[in-house]
Image: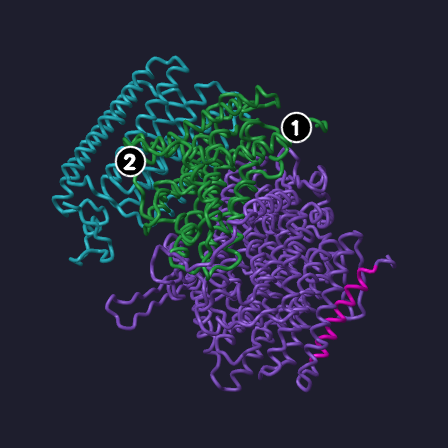
Amino acid sequence: MPDGLMLSAWLIALLQALLYVALAPLLIGWVRKVKARLQNRRGAPLLQPYADLRKLLIKETRVPHTASPLFRMAPYIVFVATWLAAATVPLVALDLPIARIADIIVLVGLLALARFFLALAGMDVGTAFGGMGASREMLISSLAEPAMLMAVFTLAMTAHSTSLESVMSHHLADGFVLRPSYLFALGALLLVALAECGRIPVDNPATHLELTMIHEAMLLEYSGRHLALMEWAAQVKLLLYGVLIANVFFPWGVGREFTPLALGLGLLAVLAKLALLGAALAIAEHVVAKMRLFRAPAFLNLALLLALLGLLSHVILEIGA
Amino acid sequence: MDMNPVLPLAGLAVALALTSSAVSLFASREPRALRRFAMPLVGLAGLAALAAGLWALIADGSATATLPLGLPWQPWRVRVDALSGLFLMIIGLVTVAVGIYGRSYVRSYERGRDSLTALGGFTGLFLTGMLLVTLADDAFLFMVAWEVMSLSSYFLVAFQHEHAANRRAAFLYLLMAHVGGLTILLGFGVLAAFGHGFEFTAMRDAVLSPGWASVAFGLVFVGFGMKAGLMPLHAWLPEAHPVAPSYISALMSGVMLKMAVYGFIRVVFDLIGDIQWQWGVIALLVGSVSALMGVLFALMQTDLKRLLAYSSVENLGIIFIALGLSLVFLGTGHSLLGSLALLAALYHSINHALFKGLLFLGAGTILHGTHERDLEQMGGLLRRMPWTGAFFLIGCLSISALPPFNGFVSEWLIFQSALQAWQLDSGVLRSIIPIASAVLALTGALVAATFVKVYGIAFLGQARSRHVRHARQGAVGMRVGMGLLAGLCVLFGVLPTQVIALIEPVSVQLLGGGLPESGAQGWLWLTPISSDTASYSAPLTILLLALIAGVAFWWFARGVPRRIRRSDPWDCGFAPPSPRMQYTAASFAQPIRRVFGLLFEIDESRPEFDDPAPRYRLKLTDRAWGLFYIPVARAVESASRRVVRLQSGNVRVYLGWTLGTLLVLLWIIS
Amino acid sequence: MTLALLPLLQQFVLLLAALVLFLSFVLLAQARLISAIHSFAWQGALVAAVTLTVAVAGETHHLYFSAILTLALKALLIPWMLHRLTRRLGLERHTEDLHWPTLAIMAAVVLVIFSYWLVTPMVAQGLAFTRNIIAVSLAVVLIGLLMMVVRQQAVAQVLGFMSMENGLFLAAVSATAGMPLVVELGVAFDVLVAMVLFGVFFFQIRESIDSLDVDRLNRLTETADPVGANPFATTDEVSQ
């Protein structure tokens, strides 16, 4: 790649990464809005999450007496690791150099890094809730992560590559093919996304004081900018999963060259896909009730089963003699 | 090869280790001899081994020699090549750290009743045994060195023998080490019968029929698998490793288990040669079971050192998954992928030596500072011992396979090789390998849960007992020893391309090819197969992580209203939390215990709700005992009960048996 | 990549076959009887859809008829009968605790790989499409049998039996473009009669041992022990 093109590619990668943090609150706002409408409420404005973040950022930050330095480091690590993971998922354009830093497995690893520190931060203050949240989070993730990796392996084995870009280009080049394995992988990834982002059948994002909380229990002691970073990271994570599902399974529309037109079209396409996914999420959360904690393993076992069937149906049905 | 300094360096390492052992003989009269001379000599021996190993890997030439020792018709032969160089390097890296650490650690024994002579003497012998295992070039020296290693570590396990549990653990260890040694010997016997000699060169040239090759593979797999602690032959490991002094545990888990890996690779990849893919499937299955069960048991433990020992079972399982993949690929003629999986296994061997060494040293520092191994009594140690806390965190992150630390790179490489399963012709293999990698993924996630528990319970929160609240910071030497390993964990994680280039000669030597593409895009990019297939840039990952974190921190932490106020924890408005309200290690693991409850034998008793002195009791047993060990023990017992009838007490009956045996033997050989 | 070269209709058949397999897993692990019946109905509908697709692709007219027959029988009539049966037996809220659901699923996965391995020798070039479908059908049959092994509830066992039949039908339709119409009608009639007989039997069994737990049938051995051959058998009572 010539130097000039390389430079512009890095610039676009940087812009795309910034777009992730910029768009993440919007997606949450959209989901909440749709949900409110479904419940016959008017709901908060679409941009409310931005206002919330801003409020948290300018507020005073409190740290418990019993907290160690890790408590203050964790929000930065969680935010940065999640962001870096997101930045490697193609949002508007393919062939960006940043995607080569990390393939899908590294992406899963970065999310695991963020989760590791999130759980540690929950245990740091030494309250009962923090430990509870950390323990449950590790239970959920220890079942969700293999399902996610297996779903991703299905895609990787089809494209013979673990790079997200190659998976998407391979999919685009093949045109419209009905792959049973993709269907299963999509199902698995949807379930995993619900579990990992703390959405409704597994965790309730709207709760603050409930014995069943998971994600919120780990953040109880955070305030001010630390809380803002943690919340923002969670929003980026939701966006990441949304883009992953939207762009990997339905890659059509993503920009393949670095012209303003292609990039603009890519942005429009991904926004449309995300709006649809967000609405679907809102409807699902509206229809489904939260499960008790020990039903969650069954939910995730279904994800594992789907991912496993995806792999098997790839091996059995899609590879010839 | 007169100019090759590899053998003299390796010989120097052995000599230093033996000297350290000899110096310790004076420790009974002068306790400080151990600290002043024996431990530094161990460190120097490690340094010499490291130099020899690095030289063998970088200068890439093998050197052989015949020693004027051994039997008259069978002099001992030694050889250093890339493979033994790599394992010399592993021994060296951990031993240097242990030498520095041990100097401070043994001080606590100086006033105790335990025999320092035994401690120092057997440490030196143990190191000698491990060094000679890697150097041996004939089965005779190999077995002698192997037994020296096993026996001296037996005495180290039995070091604090006043506790009955330690004696029991040591006996179990001795028993299983001997059964393992026996099967290895039989394996060598098969090879020697076909190669007409005990030298490795003769065995290498031996032509085995596929059946006999499989027999030899089975024997050495059982033997080395027993040493490596693979399920279901692992029972000795979680008993023996925790009871030794901590730096010995670091050597045993970090290095001695690698000797089993070395032996397996040496015999199967090097000596047997004609690899069959079925062996790979067996190794893959056993490795997967060990990895998963190992981590589940680790997660359930509340004794820190026992937990680390179970986690060694898991890591050796991962190494054998990679070795199994390599065997499958080699057996089906995919030599590039075979190299990839083999290098992944070797990489993980190095990594495990580093982070498990680090974690055991950390556990030793905690034990030293608090006299506590039980996680349920710990808490808040990060504030009492910040350096240990920081290094231990690096160890936890590395072992949990999180980027950008070293454990991640090797697991990433294993995943990459597993994902190449589509190249195989057999559909069954194509479907088994991804399932094995799914097991690996599950294992990885559970490891993260395990070490969140360890770190969160031990170092975070508040102290759960008085002696932990007044924990002492470890001595400087201990911190330096841990810091060295922690630094290496980061280094091996951030520079994977260089590490691959360093260890590539092993696969070139054994399989005739390495990974030509791995560094093709420059040192920043690790591309094991090709840049289209997968790429990972650890340096850029850590650079970006640090850069963005720095910018974010600067952005948020500037200005006036940015200061932080300390306050009481909120905890949903409940009463101020007391240490007893924290989650315990057992409660942290409870959800996962419930989900995987089928795999354990759980004996749990909960207090009644009106119990005035409520006690909760939980006992978890390995099902392997009921399924495997107890039946074997019963069979042996009933067999011996039958044999015992020979013991009539009459001397003439015994003489009759002797006469009968003699006659039969004479008849056989005539 | 072979899949991308297949015509779209064949891809569709593969997709449907994969879903049939998935529903077999759901049937195996589904604790609620009513939900299991629904899954079975969906499986029947999918088999009918496969038949229809094969009919469209191969322009074999009698397959249209058999698609309609399958849909009517397997997706509507039999599920409806089972539904009515469970209601009359008072089993609507019946859930069955599978002892080791994960183990059953793992066994089913092994069966899938095993059936793939079994059909591998059919490496006649160009038969890959057929072979893959046959592997799936065989797996469906075996999982149906496995379901009959692991379930204690008689109605669930009938579901396992019927889903075995689904697997056979799938193989017949996709591998040979359907059996002759006469045979198909005969099989359909058999299944229907079997269903009716099962219904009658259920009432008889419950009349005599007051439960539909097939483990209770152990008592029918000719032992002198009046308490029952297996004192540890779980007493999964019918909720009435």
Residue at the outermost front position? B560
In the picture of the structure, the residue carrying the numbered disc 1 is A8
Instruction: Report which quarter residue B611 is drawn in.
Output: bottom left
In the displayed structure, A221 sits above or below C144; it is below
In the displayed structure, B206 sits above or below A263; it is below
- The answer to whether residue A284 shows anywhere in this view is yes
Say left or right for A191 vs B381. left
Q: Residue at x 21, y 33 (%)?
A: C82
What chain is the cyan one?
C
The amino acid on which the numbered mark 1 sits, given as a three-letter code, is Ser
Residue A91, x across and y down, in percent: 53, 30
Tell me which secondary structure the magenta stretch mostly adopts.
helix
In the picture of the structure, the residue carrying the numbered disc 2 is C161
Magenta span covers which residues? B5-24
Q: Colour of chain B?
A: purple
The front one of B495 and B528 is B495
